[in-house]
Image: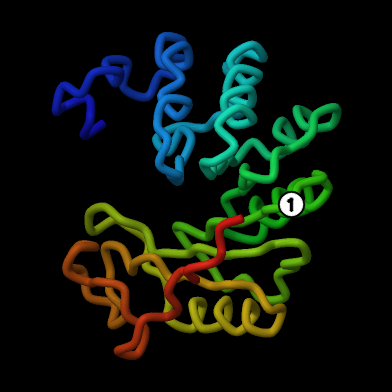
Amino acid sequence: MKLNKWGTAGYENKFNFTVHKDRLEKAIPLHRKKPTFYFINSMSDTFHENADEESLNKILEIVNKAHWHSFYFLTKRSKRMKEYFEDKIVPDNLWLGVTVENKEHGFPRIKDLQEINCKNKHICCEPLLEDLEDINLNQIKIVIAGGESGDENSRRAEPSWVKSLQNQCKKQKVHFFWKQWGAYGEDGIYRGKNTNGYLIDGKVAQSLPENFMP
């Protein structure tokens, strides 16, 4: 909504799903020689039910051709992602990931992700809405987590949930990155994400490892 209010090109339709075929045709990553990390569709969901197969194939074609870059998918439509890759090879420079905000919706997505033949898998627990105790991180290389951003109606991430997830990652030898607290800080006070920062007990939970990329 912010980008729409700011008049940013491409966001005229607000939350209505839109495929920008002109951007796919430009294939900007193919013309950039410096290795770069691309978060595909960070403001939407690539595997949305309205995403056409032709566009998905075009994205995968660009990922394959631009092999010197690293690309990152994050979806809540894990079943469609699994179905899409059933007859396709996932390039080694493509990270597949699912959102895991809670057990009810997140754990089935992890299972779908684990059933895809893929070298690099990740999950995003943002916003973290409960304790994800006994989470199965088999095949997962990195967990990125964070609190919910927004106004005072945002849901608070409890420090005990963060510690629990961090301990699970350590136990299962998975990289853990606490991105930010969100609207409510570790102490439960509402300040906004930029003020609350990224700290757990006064220390950064764990930064992204320099060599975590393929």
Residue found 57% across the figure and 25% down from its top: 62
Residue found 72% across the figure and 75% down from its top: 134
Q: Position of residue 149 (x, y in %)?
A: 31, 56
Residue found 74% across the figure and 48% down from its top: 113
Amino acid type indicated by mark 1: Lys
Seen from this angle, which residue lies furthest left?
6
Rendered position, 133 above or below 83: below
Residue 18 makes an appearance in the image? no
Residue found 39% across the figure and 64% down from its top: 147
Classify residue 90 by image quadrant.
top right
Crowd around label 1: few <14 · some 14–19 · many ≥20 (10 Å): some
Seen from this angle, which residue lies furthest bottom?
201
Q: Which residue is mark 1?
A: 119
Q: Position of residue 48 (x, y in %)?
A: 58, 26
Helix, strand or loop under label 1:
loop
Q: Quadrant of the N terminus?
A: top left
Rendered position, 7 above or below 144: above
Q: Position of residue 117 (x, y in %)?
A: 82, 45
Seen from this angle, which residue lies furthest front?
33
Rendered position, 109 above or below 212: above
Q: Nearer the viewer, residue 150 or 137?
A: 137
Q: Is residue 187 left or right of residue 105?
A: left
Q: Quadrant of the C terminus?
A: bottom right
Q: Nearer the viewer, residue 106 or 58?
A: 58
Q: Position of residue 159 (x, y in %)?
A: 42, 81
